Each structure stands twice: as structure tokens, then as C-alpha cells.
Image (cartoon, helix red, strand yellow):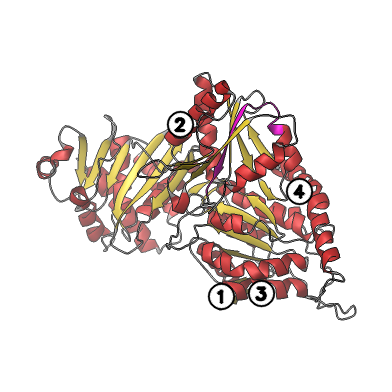
Amino acid sequence: MLEIRWHSRAGQGAVTGAKGLADVVSTTGKHVQAFAFYGSAKRGAAMTAYNRVDDKVVMNHEKYMRPDYVLVIDPALVYIADITANEKESTIYIVTTHLSTEELIASQPKLEGKKVHTIDCIKIAQETIGRPIPNTPMLGALMKISEMYDIEFFKESMVKVLKKLPQKIIDANMIAIQRAYDEVK
Amino acid sequence: MADTMELLDIEVWDGNMAASQALRQVQVDVVAAYPITPSTPIVENYANFEANGYVDGEFVMVESEHAAMSGCIGAAAAGGRVATATSSQGFALMVETLYSASGMRLPIILNVVNRALGAPLNVNGDHSDMYLGRDSGWIQFDAYCPQNAYDLNFIAFKVAEDHDIRLPAMVHQDGFMTSHTAQGVATLTDEAAYNFVGEFKPMNDMLDLDHPVTHGVQTEEDWHFEHKARQQHALMTAVIPKIEEAFDAFEKLTGRRYNLVEAYDMEDADVAVICMGTSVETAREVAEEMRAQGIKAGVVGIRVFRPWPLEQLAAVLKNVKAIAALDRSSPHGTVGTLFNEIAGTLYNSETKAVLTNYIYGLGGRDLTKAHLVSIYGDLKANMDAGKPTTPLQQYIGLRGPKLSFF
């Protein structure tokens, strides 16, 4: 069982990201689950979304999770949300930030000694998609760190997931995914 | 003619999408709806399918849930395949008309995305609304995951519309935990899905002008009792065999087996948890883990809540020594509903199991695997003692001091 927790603000696309990841994983024959805590459901409010991936049908419906990966797609949530909640020793963090990994850890001592990677998904999304929607670049970074799938296979799969969007937006998302894959540290 | 939709063999759908796809595939004629969280996407998706030519139906926007069910009653009496969806307060506002629908023997399908009843206002999942519907004369199916929400819709239409039945049916799923949780759903082709349910065959339809009928009549003490007795007779004698027939046919079509009472690891179980909704699946994982520790644990899920599968449940529980009834609804002044139903089921049977009650998960509060482990621990102690070692009714997952009664 692979478990992933997303930290996001409502409107930044964590639910879509979690669902998109589930769509891709499902095509490879694995079983998936994607869900979210909506909290007060206001745009901008801190929220969490979740993925479970397993070789057998996922029957666990508890919201409690000890994540293998924590994906933070809004830079400020490192300081205001409990991103290390229920962590394991092996939990890997991928954080959206303009800071370097060293600067980030210095600014949030809770991350000291943990497996932390950084990538500026907001900037990448702004420069490629034209909007600060950091969900698809985060998936690119996750592919690099987790080695879950070959990046070309992942991008091809994401094209199918995004097929209802205009071609221009799909293309921009593919560039964003590749850039995050290349730039994550 | 409606367009067909090409689906993947496995689609990643949440419970709402699964239900709305089923409504599309059986080509519902009329959906009258007033959306409410968390069931909103069911009717929203249907309206989308309808607007884009995937359904030859009518979407009627109304001013309340009372009007939504009233519209469904009118359309069903006129002679069409009818469905809608609701939750919580919307369900509560429908209650008056639910009794009309069942009393008039109109086979409407209502997707109830279970949600807490306020006050305090809460949009998350518990079973308060499902329990509120239990005396309304409807058939009640319960889904544990998006796949079930999809499958049980087909079964509900097939059973409800059968001329030997002609009763409305609810398909329940847990708010958010199923309705907004995306999982793999094995799909049917549009053709296979439609053919499983078949073409709608009207009965006493008001639009059959050559055979005028009256719907919504008044009967006083001269006939009311007889009408209600006939309704109960149909629920108690005709429905269960028809559901079993539909479950068999569905298994033949899809390989997926459903049962009135779902029994998991029960063949040799000493202790059992009985519950509904997503909790059944979580409990199955925990039961497996308990078995690895040497406790013969099982799980029983109620698949058909009404009509209550009394004989089937008694058979499943025959050799169990300790049972926990888990109720996701505040019973407000007594023991939980499942506790009562199970006690009634077993009282005149040979089974002398210790039965205790747990209230859990109100307003969407998480039921964790750790909670279930502690419940199985209680059950093991009850079995060893041969009597309850805890109060009869306990609260699980509640913050603050422990709360228990009796």
C-alpha cells in the first residue's frame, strides 16, 4: 500500500491532482483511492487530499493515514498546516517553495532530518499554464522522486486524463510536468 | 435516440459519478431534483448528460426536495422511469412524500447520499437520514463503495419496477466517504446495462387514456388498513425473492456477487462486527488482521436494510459468541437501530451471543482501524466472560470523557 497526502488550498487543484494520479495509476492495473477533506470548503482555505494505491482493492476507508509521501502545493502551508502529522520515519516530503531545500528547512525546523525535496510548482505553473495551479507540476516532481512511472509514460497518460481541456492547456501542462521533473531537488 | 458513451473497463469514479452514470445507462425518463450536498453531483451529472444528448429524458428543476419527490411521484404515476437524489435535510423535507410514493406503489429510485441531520449543521456522512427513512415503505439498499453505488442502482430499478413489486427503492451511499471518494469502478457497456434493467413497462399509468385510473386516493377506516397490509405483504414476501433473483442475474452478467446480508470471514467466526456503509470494508481489513492475531473475527454488512433480512441474518449469526452492532446515527433516547434489529432477530433463535452497541462516526467523524481493533478486543473479552464486560452502549471516537449507557 502506497499512501500520499496532499496539502493545498481549496482551488489549487489538489483534488484534481489526486484524481488525475488515481486515473493514471488505475490504467496500470493497480487499485486506487482518491479523496479529500473539504473543511469549511471556502476557496483559499487550507485542505488536504489523499491517495491510496495497492495491488488489491483498497477497502480501508479510514481518513487517518501515515503517508509515504507528503505533497505540499502551497508554500505558506509549511508554516500554518501540520504537514508532518502522522508521519513515518520513511515519509518523503515534496514542497512547493521558491526557497532552496536548505533555506526551507532553516525556516521550518520541524523538517530537520527529514527527507525533503523542493520545487517551485507555483512559478512553473505561472510560466507554463499561465495560472498558479501547481497540481500537475507536483505530479511531475513526484514521478522523479518516487520513480513510480517513466516520465514519458506518465505524460502520455496525463494527456488522456486532461483530454477535455483545450490543446493549448494540455500542452502547457505537459511542459509544466516535465519542468518539475527536471527541476525538483 | 440518445448517444452512447464509450467507457473504460475500469473508470476511476466517485460514488456520485457512479450513481449518475447508472441513471444515464438505464435512460431515466424524468429526474426532478433539488440539489443538496453531498448528493448534488448525481443530479448535476445527469443534467449534463441530458443537455449533451446522452439521455432522452427530462430534467425538472423544482423549488424544494418536497417538490422534487412530488414531481417524481407525478412522473411515475404518469408512467415513466423516474429517479432523483438527495441527502440529510433535503431527505427530511421529502419524508412526507416518501410515504406517498410507497403507498401509491410507484417505483421511483432515490439515491440517498447519507449525511448527518442538523442542528448543528454538518455536511458530512452519517446514517441519520437513512434511519429516518426506515419506516417509509421503501426498499433500502446500502452501498459500501463507488462500485456498489453503481451496481445497486441497476438492481434497484430491476426490482422496484417489476410488476410483482411496484415499490420505490433507495440506494444509500456514505456522504464523502463514498460519494466524493474516487475508486476503480468496473463498468458495463451502455447496452448491457440497459438490457439488464430492460425497457420500462408502465402499470396503471395515468397517460394511458384508454384505461383511466385514479392515483392518490383517500381511504378511511374502511380500507386504509387493508391497503397498508397489502403494502407490507409485498415488502415482506415478494421483495426478498425478487432481490435475490436480481442479485443472481447480476452475478451472471458481471461476476460480482451481492447478498441480502454480506458475510465476511463468518464461517467459523467467534466474534462479529455488524455495520453498514464504508465501515464494512474497513472492518473487513481489521478482521483479517485480528485473525492473524488468533482472534476468529468476522464482519457482517447489511446490504438490504429494508425489508430487513431477518432470517438470512439469523442464519449468518448462528454460531457467533459476541456481536458488536455499530450505529452511525444518534439514537436519541434508546439503543442504536442496528442493536435493536439484531436483538429482535436473535431473541427467539438458538443463538445466545453477547450483543453490545457502539455509536460512532456522527457527522463524518473518522472510524479508524484502531477503533475497530479496540471493539474486537471488547468482543473477545465478552466472549470469554459469556456476558457483556462493557456497558451495552458505548461511544467510539468521541473526544472528552468516555460516554456510555446501560
Separation of marks 1 and 3 at Cα, in angstroms: 10 Å
CB atoms of marks 1 and 2 within 8 Å: no
Mark 4 chain = B
Q: Residue B210: x percent and y percent?
A: 90, 80
Quadrant of the rendered image containing residue B348: top right
Q: Which residue is mark 3?
A: B70
- Mark 4 vs 3, N-terminal side: 3
Q: Residue furthest top?
A: B294
The range drawn in magenta is B316-328
- Element under label 4? helix
Please name the amino acid that badge 2 sits on. Ser
Q: Which residue is mark 2?
A: B374
On the same chain, marks 1 and 3? The answer is yes
Nearer to us: label 4 or label 3: 3
Q: Residue at x 60, y 51 (%)?
A: B149
Please name the amino acid that badge 4 sits on. Ile
